[in-house]
């Protein structure tokens, strides 16, 4: 195998490995978040350095540092403005940013900055701009390669299941890929990367609940409206999460924010086709309770509407698939279950505050004779 073939295969495999690593880091045990990120990005950077010697980092000069500081400052300022607008316009971004802050807080600020400065920023630039983009440039030219790298970089972050992370990755990846297309060195890009992501996460750690809510959240909302693009993004996230879960028997995507995740497959009444979605699950004896929150939107999620039409479904927990029958909880039974699920994930209480609809709770019981 030629060096070019080996490098292309490493680049292709690395994109998938990055997506899987981010899924584990953001959906797995919180205590392992930074260790998983370091292993994922460190491995990608090492692989890129081995197959693409020209991509290896060299010492950064004074001009690289000054340029990175200027560029990073501008990116931080622009990012703060976009972040404020996104949080007020898209409640999901605000909720996911809170999850991100919680994960960022699993390590002290010094350890977090060390991970970002010494591992994540240089390793990502070695792999994404030094290997992936440079190889695409030879085939597509600088402009198209920058666009393609940005798309791949963004898609690799979708399995994290965090809209704030995916949005930030799109903006950061697009900027860095454009700078690379214009001839910026990997050393300078790694510094720009660090100068943006370190202040952004430090600011997130310091954000208070009052700042987070903002004036737009003071009145009781009727609920958020899911846009067409929001639905498409959710469908893409569900598809990636479900595929990783099923291929690994739940080892990837089986836990998120301390809760066990299951894959619920319902039947679409219109055409009888299956519809699968990852959901937090809460055991209650032989039964499982799931929540139709839809992140506090005005309407019920599709899977819940499917269950209203056809209550028989399948639930995958780890490597086991169970035939279940759904029943919507009412009155006192719902109230008792609601207290339990909110203890498991406090975000449900925030989702309920966003909407005037009562968020349904669904009990999934084993179907008679099916186990």
Image (cartoon, helix red, strand yellow):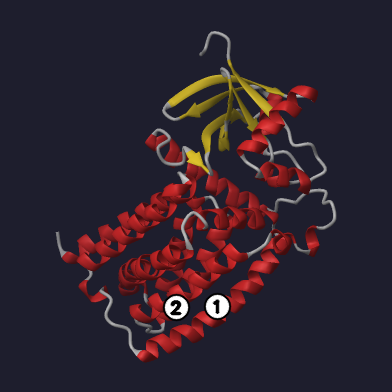
Please state the horizontal and vertical placement of residue 315, each as a whole percent of the image.
53, 26
Residue 164, picture quadrant: bottom right
Residue 9, picture quadrant: bottom left
Instruction: Give neighbour class at mark 2: few <14, some 14-19, many 20+ (Cα, 10 Å).
Output: many
Closer to us: 122 or 264 = 122
User: Looking at the image, which residue is at 48% across and 61% down?
Assistant: 154
Closer to us: 10 or 309 = 10
Q: Is residue 40 visible?
A: yes
Please state the horizontal and vertical placement of residue 66, each as a whole percent of the image.
44, 89
Callout 2 secondary element: helix
In the picture, the quarter occupied by the N terminus is bottom left
Instruction: Give neighbour class at mark 1: few <14, some 14-19, many 20+ (Cα, 10 Å).
Output: many
Mark 1–mark 2 Cα distance, whole angstroms, equals 9 Å
Closer to us: 114 or 122 = 114
User: Looking at the image, which residue is at 57% across and 36% down?
Assistant: 280
Q: Which mark is residue 192?
A: 2
Q: Which residue is mark 1?
A: 75
Residue that lies at the very extreme toward the bottom in this rendered image? 63
Closer to us: 293 or 211 = 211
């Amino acid at each position: 195998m030629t060096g070019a073939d080996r490098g292309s295969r490493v680049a292709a495999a690395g994109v998938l490995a990055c997506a899987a690593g981010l899924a584990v880091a953001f959906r797995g045990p919180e205590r392992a978040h930074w260790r998983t990120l370091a292993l994922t990005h460190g491995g990608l950077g090492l692989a890129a350095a081995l197959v693409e010697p020209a991509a290896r980092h060299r010492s950064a000069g004074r001009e690289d540092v000054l340029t990175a500081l200027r560029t990073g400052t501008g990116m931080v300022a622009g990012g703060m403005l976009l972040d404020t607008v996104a949080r007020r316009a898209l409640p999901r971004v605000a909720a996911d940013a809170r999850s991100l802050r919680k994960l960022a807080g699993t390590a002290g600020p010094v350890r977090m900055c060390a991970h970002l400065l010494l591992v994540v920023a240089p390793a990502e630039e070695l792999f994404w701009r030094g290997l992936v983009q440079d190889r695409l440039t030879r085939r597509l030219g600088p402009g198209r390669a920058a666009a393609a790298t940005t798309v791949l970089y963004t898609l690799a972050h979708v399995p994290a299941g965090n809209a704030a992370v995916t949005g930030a990755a799109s903006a950061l990846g697009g900027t860095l890929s454009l700078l690379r297309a214009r001839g910026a060195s990997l050393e300078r890009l790694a510094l720009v990367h660090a100068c943006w992501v370190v202040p952004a996460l430090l600011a997130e750690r310091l954000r208070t609940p009052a700042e987070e809510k903002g004036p737009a959240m003071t009145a009781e909302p009727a609920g958020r409206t899911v846009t067409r693009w929001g639905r498409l993004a959710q469908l893409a996230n569900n598809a990636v999460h479900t595929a990783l879960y099923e291929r690994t028997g739940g080892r990837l995507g089986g836990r998120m924010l301390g809760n066990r995740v299951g894959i619920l497959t319902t039947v679409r009444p219109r055409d009888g086709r299956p519809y699968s979605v990852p959901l937090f699950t809460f055991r209650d004896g032989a039964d499982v309770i799931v929540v139709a929150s839809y992140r506090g939107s005005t309407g019920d999620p599709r899977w819940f509407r499917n269950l209203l039409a056809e209550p028989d479904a399948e639930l995958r927990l780890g490597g086991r698939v169970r035939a279940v029958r759904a029943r919507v909880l009412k009155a006192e039974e719902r109230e008792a279950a609601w207290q339990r699920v909110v203890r498991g994930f406090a975000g449900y209480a925030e989702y309920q505050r966003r909407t005037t609809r009562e968020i349904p709770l669904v009990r999934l019981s084993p179907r008679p004779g099916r186990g």
